[in-house]
Amino acid sequence: MGSSIRPIALGLIRRREQILVFEARDDVKGETFHRPLGGGIEFGEHSKDALEREFREELDAEIKVGELRGVLENVFDWRGNPGHEIAFIYEAEFADPDRYGVDAMKILDDPATARWVDLAEFREGRRILYPEGLIGLLSADQ
């Protein structure tokens, strides 16, 4: 992870009362968590462009990037190493509506799989959603 701050862009893609996330495990903490898809912003790249690129790389999918929901600062430990991210959180939607009918999507550049998870599971504390503060950006009526 290094000692630098990593800018990232994450996309909130919704299907009714669900959002698309991937699941990861930190065995050092003994914690399983979820996070929306997206990734690093390259030097000179706008965060919206980075989000579109990441969805092409991760799911071979085109998206339409919508409203910026917020920016979160995420200081964390991942597998015993410190990390620091500035996350641009965008509403987004798939350009291809058929994607919403797929329950699980293999992430092409990672061993993980993206799945739809009910927002209620995060709000009620049954599952962990990162980055911290993300659930606060999602109002109860969404």
Image (spheres, rainbow, N blue to C red):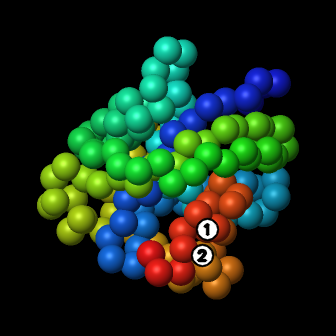
Type of amino acid at the residue the image marks with label 2: Phe
Q: Residue at x 25, y 53 (%)?
A: 94
Q: Which mark is on residue 135?
A: 1
Q: Which mark is residue 122?
A: 2
Residue 16 falls in image quadrant: bottom left
- Do callouts 2 and 1 mark residues in contact (Cβ within 8 Å)? yes
Q: What is the total number of numbered labels drawn onto the structure image? A: 2
Nearest to N terminus: mark 2 or mark 1: 2
Disc 1 residue crowd, few under 14, some 14–19, many 20+, Cα 10 Å: some
Tell me the CA gap for discs 2 and 1: 7 Å
Can residue 44 be seen at all in this image of the molecule? Answer: yes
Mark 2 element type: helix
Instruction: Identify the residue at image location x=47%, y=32%.
Output: 47
Q: 73 or 80, which is in the foreground?
A: 73
Q: Determine whether 102 is above or below 121 in the image.
A: above
Does the rendering let one see residue 114? no
Question: Which one is in front, 73 or 40?
Answer: 73
Q: Secondary structure at mark 1?
A: helix
**Comparing labels 2 and 1, the label whose residue is closer to the camera:** 1
Quadrant of the image containing the C terminus: bottom left
